[in-house]
């Protein structure tokens, strides 16, 4: 009897060890991602995706074949149906998240807290929230965040990461949540954090700022966030050499310095949640991606979590966006092979 109990205990010990090892391994797997918020609209308007041999193929499969293991999806509050500036509702996001999960991909949800694009130049309140007082806005952020994430979980997808705001160096939900009023911005960010953790404590919360090579901008923002006791798990960075009119080779050292500085200064993990290069400069974009991935992987102690391309499938012929990684013939750009080779 004792022998049987010993064997049983040993078996359970082995099972638990394997489980804990698997969990630890999953948490340290480098994220190679793609933001594909345009994909439902592209499919709805009849855009077709093709592999290198000319066969039509599902877009997420094409991305997975090139090493992509994570998908990022934006959420707008009450979006319209315009093909370029609409969609991205809670319902559409759930459908896309389920698709990604079925492909074995990890999921990031990116809250814009707007009815359309939010970025450093604009952080417009959703129309339904425009006349709300600040206490009401706090409730709006909490309730909207909780609703989307809990609905995702009920549908069978628990996101690994959630962004509270999109590129918010100047704050969000202007003017109430502007960086001109850090006390209020801090409260809004914490409401988003609390809503996510109320659904699942294991979801990692990201705060996202643009110009990942600009250390002064990041120190200013996150010093203020620290002063306001903002709660978050990961610092998210955008990195687009194109928008600052410099080649990546001129700024990659600054990006690497900033990644390491953020970890040391704030004791947070870091992640490039947006990157992109020019679609007609394939080799340069390939090299940009290789260098960016290397910079994130070099962050000590696996605290550099991953790199995500923004709308790689968003072909210029459809989107008029020059920084996709898709060709005019509907095929993936060879630049994406940078993910596959890592």
Image (cartoon, rainbow, N blue to C red):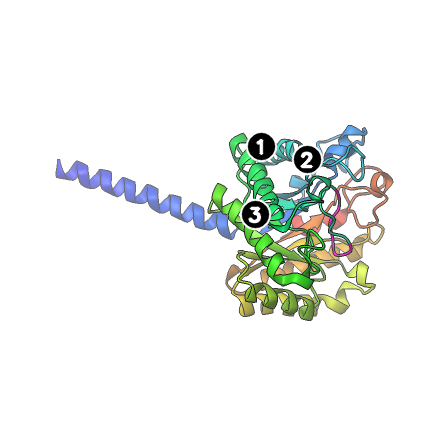
Q: Is 98 situated above or below 115? A: above
* Image position of 32 (left or right of 301): right
Disc on res. 89: 2
Q: Where residue 339 sits: x, y (%)?
A: 66, 50
Task: Determine contact: label 3, label 2, CB under 8 Å.
Answer: no
Give the residue at x 51% y 49%. 194
Q: Is 254 situated above or below 18? A: below
In the depicted view, which residue is nearer to us: 111 or 263? 111
Q: Main secondary structure of the magenta part?
A: loop
Disc on res. 18: none
- Neighbour class for label 2 at 10 Å: few (<14), some, many (≥20)? some
Whether residue 175 appears in magenta in the rendering, the answer is: no
Task: Determine contact: label 3, label 1, CB under 8 Å.
Answer: no
In the depicted view, which residue is nearer to us: 14 or 168? 168
Secondary structure of the residue carrying tag 2 is loop
Secondary structure of the residue carrying tag 3 is strand
Residue 246 in which image quadrant: bottom right
- Neighbour class for label 3 at 10 Å: few (<14), some, many (≥20)? many
Q: CA distance from mark 3 to mark 1?
A: 17 Å
Q: Where residue 203 sits: x, y (%)?
A: 51, 46
In the picture of the structure, the residue carrying the numbered disc 1 is 102
Give the residue at x 39% y 43%. 19
The span shown in magenta is 116-121
Mark found first going from the N terminus, 1 or 2 = 2
Q: Where residue 106 sits: x, y (%)?
A: 57, 42
Disc on res. 161: 3
Mark found first going from the N terminus, 3 or 2 = 2
Confirm whether residue 246 shows in the render. yes
Q: The N terminus appears in which quarter of the rendering? A: top left
């Amino acid at each position: 009897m004792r022998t049987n109990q010993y064997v049983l205990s040993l078996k359970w010990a082995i099972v638990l060890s394997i489980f804990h090892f698997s969990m630890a391994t999953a948490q340290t797997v480098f994220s190679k991602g793609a933001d594909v918020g345009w994909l439902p609209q592209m499919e709805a308007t009849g855009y077709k995706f093709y592999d290198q041999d000319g066969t039509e193929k599902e877009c997420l499969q094409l991305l997975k074949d090139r090493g992509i293991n994570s998908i990022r999806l934006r959420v707008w509050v009450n979006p319209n149906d315009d093909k370029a500036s609409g969609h991205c509702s809670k319902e559409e996001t759930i459908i896309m998240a389920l698709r990604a999960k079925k492909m074995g991909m990890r999921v990031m949800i990116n809250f814009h807290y707007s009815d359309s694009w939010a970025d450093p130049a604009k952080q417009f309140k959703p129309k339904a929230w425009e006349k709300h007082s600040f206490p009401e806005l706090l409730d709006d952020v909490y309730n909207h965040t909780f609703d989307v994430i809990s609905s995702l979980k009920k549908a069978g997808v628990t996101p690994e990461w959630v962004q509270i705001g999109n590129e918010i160096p100047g704050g969000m939900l202007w003017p109430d949540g502007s960086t001109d009023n850090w006390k209020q911005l801090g409260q809004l960010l914490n409401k988003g954090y609390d809503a996510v953790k109320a659904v699942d404590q294991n979801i990692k919360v990201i705060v996202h700022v643009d110009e990942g090579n600009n250390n002064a901008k990041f120190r200013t923002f996150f010093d203020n966030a620290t002063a306001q006791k903002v709660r978050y798990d990961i610092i998210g960075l955008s990195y687009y050499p194109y928008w600052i009119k410099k080649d990546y080779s001129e700024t990659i050292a600054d990006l690497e310095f900033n990644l390491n500085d953020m970890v040391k200064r704030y004791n947070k993990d870091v992640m490039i949640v947006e990157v992109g290069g020019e679609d007609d400069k394939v080799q340069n974009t390939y090299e940009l991606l290789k260098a960016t991935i290397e910079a994130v992987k070099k962050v000590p102690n696996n605290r550099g979590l991953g790199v995500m391309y923004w709308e790689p499938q968003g072909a210029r012929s459809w989107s008029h966006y020059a920084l996709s990684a898709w060709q005019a013939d509907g095929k993936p750009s060879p630049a994406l092979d940078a993910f596959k080779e890592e």
